[in-house]
Image (cartoon, helix red, strand yellow):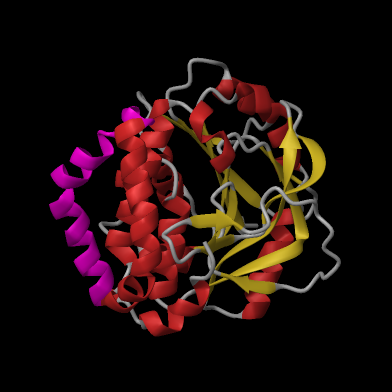
Amino acid sequence: MGSKLSIVLITWNSCRFLDRCCDGIRQQDIPLELIVVDNASSDRSVEAILERIPEASVIRNGSNVGFSAAANQGIQSSSAPFVLLLNPDVFLCSGFAGKLIEAMERKGERTGSATGKLLRGRGVGIEPTKIVDSRGIRMTRNGRHLDIDAGREDSETDASVTEVFGVSGAAALYRREFLRDVAVDGQPFDNAFFAYREDADLSWRGRLFGWNAIYVPSAVAYHVRSVTPERRRTLPDAINFHSVKNRFQLRLKNQGLYLAMRNAPFELGRDLLVLASTLLTERSSLPAWPWLWQHRHDVMRKRREIQRRRTVDDRELARWFTGW
């Protein structure tokens, strides 16, 4: 019997989480293949997985190529009609993937991605809490993308499947046809993002190309999230650098003229704050600006292709850009 699901697990010195993560993979109740893409870990990440799931396929990179490139490697090596992109610090509860697939099939073939209820996990054991990590991605008028209800206590009682703008890459299920359709230069995820905001970029491109995303609250997983807005000042310099450059890549590639004009008063204020921050308090992120200039031709080339292929007008997408 062929696999209905490919799980792409990306590791980088992730050994401490992998016992618990593998437990979650093992208790999924549908035929699956596991593809591990390791970004040159110096710990026993790969060995820890193979001890628990010896049938896993492994791609070992000689260096850290970034989350986006690793995800693309795993997707290219996978074969099932559905692909679950998974972080190693995530524990999947029983039936997580099956519930997402069932909901996507019920919603129709233009449903390209799905997420479950991600709650915060604690420590290396990914111990469960009742704090929401993500119910999907929402977009704001000032150029941010945020996880829906992140940091709030989970008090949800409605089990209805609902539509969301996009899904968090921590535990995201994609239809293979979606990944093929939205690829640019053969890449579902943009390698230039390296890490951070790549899931929002893919979600926005999917919306432009006429695909939908859903949230399925009955599918539950736990995620140990280390990168949050309130912890920005304590994060490594590289993370903040990618966060700044990708903030602008995201808009330069995907935002049409109507949304740019509609959101400009809100985005400009936020952009000035980001610029001031890199000049005054977060100078390690200053290289984001020359990076954007040096890569402007490539970014704009991708923009031209995306805007040429889009099938949905900005006026239809405007309903997703609310608040700040």
Query: Across the whole image, how many numbered discs are drawn on residues?
Result: 0
Q: Residue at x 37, y 38 (%)?
A: 277
Quadrant in the picture for residue 283: top left
Q: Position of residue 178 (x, y in %)?
A: 45, 67
Quarter of the picture containing the N terminus is bottom right
Image vertical order of residue 142 relative to residue 110, above or below: above
Image vertical order of residue 220 relative to residue 259, above or below: above
Q: Which residues are magenta?
A: 281-308
Judge whether residue 189 can be spotted in this image: no
The residue lying toward the viewer, choosing from 48 and 324, is 324
Image vertical order of residue 261 relative to residue 282, above or below: below
The residue lying toward the viewer, choosing from 228 and 8, is 228
Q: Is residue 88 in the magenta section?
A: no
Q: Is residue 294 in the magenta section?
A: yes
The residue lying toward the viewer, choosing from 140 and 300, is 140
Decide if residue 185 is on the left or right side of residue 24.
Answer: left
Q: Position of residue 158 (x, y in %)?
A: 82, 70
Image vertical order of residue 125 relative to residue 178, above or below: above
Decide if residue 207 is on the left or right side of residue 113.
Answer: left
Magenta segment's dominant SS is helix
Q: Residue at x 66, y 29 (%)?
A: 18
Q: Position of residue 285 (x, y in %)?
A: 33, 33
Q: Position of residue 312 (x, y in %)?
A: 38, 82
Q: Residue at x 62, y 27 (%)?
A: 50
Judge whether residue 307 can be spotted in this image: yes
